Image: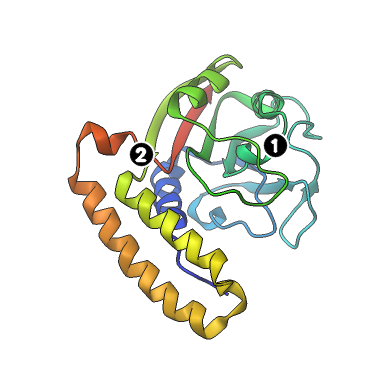
Amino acid sequence: MYIYQIERTLIHAQVKRFAKHISGDVLDVGGGERNRYKDLFIYKTFTCLDISAGPEVDIVASADAIPLPDGSKDAVVSTQMLEHVKYPERCVQEMYRVLKKGGHALVTAPQWNELHSEPHDYWRYTKYGFIELFERNGFRVVEYEQRGGFFSNAAQMTLRYFLDRLHLHNRPVLGRVFSRIFQAMGAFAIFLDRHDTSEANRKHAIGWCFLFRKE
């Protein structure tokens, strides 16, 4: 069942803002069984690669060994995947390899998140780690955006605690009640973050959205 989560709302908004740069033959690396953001893009073909089979997965393979030719894709999308791979450097190298020259990669990852998808939860990324990882593998940063601040982070931590503590995904009635509470809490947190431009708030990102280019 659907339960509101502030981070997913923020990711959707970020991907939507960056979507104009993604077109042509698109590869979604780690898209999972549901392509949440596919409808935000205008594309010629959209191919989903994931380590596990699913109804919307086209290629079952590891992100560090993509079975596609060099320079075969116009764009790459990868949302909330890099924290789950043992060898993120290899994954970035593979994204670079399959991209055409001048192609874009739209990538999101968390700076904070609770332990999840165990045991395959390995990494968290600051903006500096993000930039270092991609630039040393040939990419150029085009644009990036912080996701959330202190208030959004606090809201996400709170809702994730109660989501797990009360097993809300398995309790439909209670889950719907809490989803409405989480939605109101999330809207207020986003409002507060938007109006708090302090250095202190800037340090508490939930995560990042980056647009890279293959030169």
Q: Which label sits on residue 177?
A: none
Q: Which of marks 1 and 2 is in front?
A: 2
Q: How crowded is mark 2: few (under 14 residues within 10 Å), some or many (20 or more)?
A: some
Relative to 107, does residue 3 appear above or below in the rendering? below
x and y percentages locating residue 142 in the rendered image: 42, 25
The answer to whether residue 6 shows anywhere in this view is no
Q: Is residue 18 left or right of residue 33?
A: left
Quadrant of the image occupied by residue 64: top right
Q: Which amino acid does label 1 sit on?
A: Val
**Residue most extreme to the bottom:** 173
Relative to 168, does residue 57 appear above or below in the rendering? above
Along the viewing direction, whichever of 127 and 39 lies nearer the viewer: 127
Residue at 38% x, 75% y: name it: 180
Give the SS element for disc 2: loop
Q: Which label sits on residue 204?
A: 2
Residue at 45% x, 22% y: name it: 128
Along the viewing direction, whichever of 186 and 215 lies nearer the viewer: 186
Residue located beneath label 1 in the image: 85
Q: How far apart are marks 1 and 2 (CA)?
A: 24 Å
x and y percentages locating residue 178 in the rendered image: 43, 75
Q: Which amino acid does label 2 sit on?
A: His
Q: Is residue 14 left or right of residue 139?
A: left
x and y percentages locating residue 49 in the rendered image: 73, 45
